[in-house]
């Protein structure tokens, strides 16, 4: 069937949007959606994906951007701080998994060079799936979460030498491999030295000049140039494109422009990586999967159990409790997105054939589909298997917390001991009010504990922790954590133990105020409003307005839950995809032919559109009090408040009826 390039692009976009949207609804990663789209449109199914070299080039650039982003997420200081887990536990896991997986692949008839690559590919886990799922489940800072992330860090690092060695293995002459490997190693060290010197001497001054232009377009173009130029440089050394991109990201991670670079490059990475995974899915022959279903299923189960067991055993030998080790293995038992990248490079270099990789690609995909379920229920599975020791082990509240709270009553529990939590603790201490603080940052707790603070390790979302903190006898619960979803979990847990305790929640802005009130918060304190009101008090004092009058306004605003202040005008930079549910102000200018001109408020029905009429500027006058007799005039500037969808609907009503 013939299709134009536009038809092909529209087909891929439509299917990608639909499939990724469905997977997002059931909380599965977008990567799986792209793979499924590729399977559907590939040559072995509907055959809608054109066999175009440009697509392969763009897909390869997607891998380059992915390695660039991974370099950005690393930092040399972070690697040094986590060296024992990352380079110790991570390296041993990759070596054992690579050798054992390679040996099994070799026994099936694959040449040893290709078998080694297969073992290396299957030794890698999915950073995208694991990190997102752990973050959504609030387990990133738990011990098994930290261990999993540390091992993933080394796995991501291991991709670079693995991609470098594949072209060398493809030479086929066993006696000549030593010298090429040494040459490649030398080239890699030279590339690292050059990139390090460029990063230290040129990158920061270069970005200073770029940032001085105050142009987002130039900044984005500069970032694209740096990432692709670094990839080109290592390619000139005879190494992989991905290595240069990784080194460039690593150098930029040490600069103050890291976060802006990451923001700029992410859209390009996401789109091109989506194309890469579509091309991988297109290479999967569904007929072979159906024909070899039993062996693919066996390979999938063997991968999850075998790799998970290796990680669990190594973690146990590292000195962690068995439940912690088991959860870590359960989380990391799958193959990952880099497995596909490694296999594709191996195929293009002739180390593996497409037929040989079909079962491996299928098993990798199945393991990634199963993983979110295993991670989602990892706690429940571990509790079932270790019922007798689980709660008394890794999830039990620290003995110090139990001892400290045994005699407490009428105390304050602070959830989150960051800057705001620590400032609050200082005030409570000055006022002679007892408090207990809970946090999950080990280093913070250690330093604060040594300084004499009453702070303990504990996940406040768990009822067991709150119970041991004697929530039932406490006078108040303060949540200072700047994450509305975490705050919701804590409120639910707290209300299940004590329905009457006052719960005061910190909020960065007004977006989640009503939601937090609905789930049980007594008071929600938005930082943006409090800061603006404190500034207003100081301004009014300088203007000679009595302090009691300005304080009365502040107190009235608090009693009214800041409703008069909750909407504000938002510029383009604050209209992100995550802000669609935030209240905002918007001004609509009525034209002579506008529907609302000459009509009353009752004709507009603001309430039906979930919007509020705040004010009307008519000439030099600002009108804020309305009754049913009020009529809109042509030229009126109508100020309305609501979420984005309500604003759009109300504007349509005002202008077109």
Image (spheres, rainbow, N blue to C red):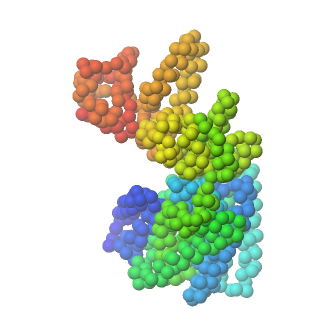
Residue drawn at 76 percent across, 60 percent down:
193
Choose between 637 and 463: the one closer to the eye.
Answer: 463
Q: Percent position (x, y) of residue 202? A: 72, 50
Which quadrant: the N terminus?
bottom left
Residue drawn at 67 percent across, 76 percent down:
96
Q: Is residue 496 left or right of residue 412?
A: left
Residue drawn at 34 percent across, 27 percent down:
613
Q: Percent position (x, y) of residue 372? A: 49, 63
Q: Is residue 182 left or right of residue 499?
A: right
Which quadrant: the C terminus?
top left
Quadrant of residue 238 within the rendered picture = bottom right
Where 56 falls versus 435 (above or below)?
below
Q: Residue furthest front?
A: 407
Choose between 446 and 621: the one closer to the eye.
Answer: 446
Where 271 falls versus 625 (above or below)?
below
Q: Percent position (x, y) of residue 487? A: 52, 44
Q: Percent position (x, y) of residue 442? A: 68, 51
Residue drawn at 62 percent across, 52 percent down:
397
| Observer able to see residue 178 | yes
């Amino acid at each position: 069937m013939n299709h134009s390039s536009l038809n092909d692009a529209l087909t891929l976009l439509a299917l990608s949007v639909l499939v990724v949207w469905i997977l997002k609804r059931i909380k599965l990663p977008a990567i799986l959606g792209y793979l499924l789209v590729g399977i559907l449109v590939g040559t072995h199914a509907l055959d809608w994906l054109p066999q175009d070299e440009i697509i392969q080039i763009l897909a390869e650039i997607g891998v380059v951007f992915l390695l660039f982003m991974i370099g950005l997420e690393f930092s040399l200081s972070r690697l040094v701080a986590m060296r024992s887990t990352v380079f110790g536990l991570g390296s041993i896991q990759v070596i054992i998994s690579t050798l054992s997986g390679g040996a099994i692949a070799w026994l099936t008839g694959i040449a040893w060079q290709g078998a080694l690559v297969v073992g290396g590919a299957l030794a890698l886990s999915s950073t995208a799936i694991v990190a997102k799922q752990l973050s959504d489940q609030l387990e990133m800072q738990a011990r098994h979460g930290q261990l999993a992330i540390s091992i993933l860090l080394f796995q991501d690092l291991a991709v670079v030498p693995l991609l470098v060695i594949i072209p060398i293995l493809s030479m086929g002459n066993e006696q000549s491999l030593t010298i090429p490997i040494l040459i490649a190693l030398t080239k890699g060290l030279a590339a690292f030295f050059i990139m390090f010197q460029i990063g230290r001497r040129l990158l920061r001054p270069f970005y200073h000049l770029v940032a001085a232009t105050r142009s987002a377009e130039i900044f984005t173009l500069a970032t694209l140039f740096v990432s692709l130029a670094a990839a080109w440089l290592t390619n000139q050394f005879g190494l992989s494109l991905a290595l240069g991109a990784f080194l460039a990201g690593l150098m930029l991670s040490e600069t103050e422009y890291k976060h802006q670079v990451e923001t700029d490059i992410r859209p390009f990475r996401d789109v091109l990586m989506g194309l890469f995974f579509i091309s991988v899915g297109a290479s999967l022959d569904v007929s072979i999967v159906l024909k070899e279903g039993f062996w693919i299923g066996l390979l999938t189960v063997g991968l999850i159990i075998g790799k998970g067991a290796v990680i669990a055993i190594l973690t146990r030998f590292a000195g962690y409790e068995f439940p912690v080790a088991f959860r870590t293995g359960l989380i990391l038992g799958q193959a990952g997105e880099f497995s596909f990248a490694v296999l594709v490079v191996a195929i293009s270099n002739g180390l593996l054939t497409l037929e040989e990789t079909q079962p491996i690609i299928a098993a990798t995909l199945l393991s990634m589909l199963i993983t979110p379920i295993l991670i989602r229920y990892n706690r429940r599975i571990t509790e079932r298997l270790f019922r007798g020791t689980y709660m008394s082990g890794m999830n039990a509240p620290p003995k110090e917390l139990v001892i400290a709270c045994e005699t407490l009553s009428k105390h304050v529990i602070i959830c989150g001991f960051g800057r705001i939590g620590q400032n609050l603790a200082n005030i409570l201490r000055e006022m002679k009010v007892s408090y207990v603080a809970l946090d999950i940052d080990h280093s913070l707790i250690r330093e604060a504990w040594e300084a004499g603070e009453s702070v303990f390790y504990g996940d406040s979302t768990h009822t067991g922790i709150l119970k041991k903190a004697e929530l039932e006898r406490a006078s108040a619960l303060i949540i200072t954590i700047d994450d509305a979803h975490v705050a919701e979990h804590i409120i639910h847990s707290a209300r299940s133990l004590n329905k009457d305790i006052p719960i005061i929640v910190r909020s960065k802005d007004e977006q989640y105020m009503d939601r937090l009130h609905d789930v049980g918060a007594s008071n929600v304190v938005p930082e943006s409003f409090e800061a603006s009101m404190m500034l207003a008090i100081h301004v009014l004092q300088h203007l000679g307005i009595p302090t009691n009058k300005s304080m009365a306004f502040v107190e009235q605003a608090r009693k009214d839950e800041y409703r008069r202040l909750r909407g504000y005008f938002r510029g383009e930079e604050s209209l992100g995809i995550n802000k669609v549910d935030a209240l905002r102000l918007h001004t609509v200018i009525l034209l002579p032919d506008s529907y609302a001109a000459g009509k009353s408020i009752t004709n507009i029905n603001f309430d039906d559109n979930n919007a509020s009429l705040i004010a009307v500027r008519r000439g030099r006058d600002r009108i804020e009090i309305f009754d049913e007799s009020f009529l809109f005039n042509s030229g009126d500037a109508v100020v309305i408040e609501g979420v984005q969808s309500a604003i759009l609907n109300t504007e349509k009503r005002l202008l077109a009826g």
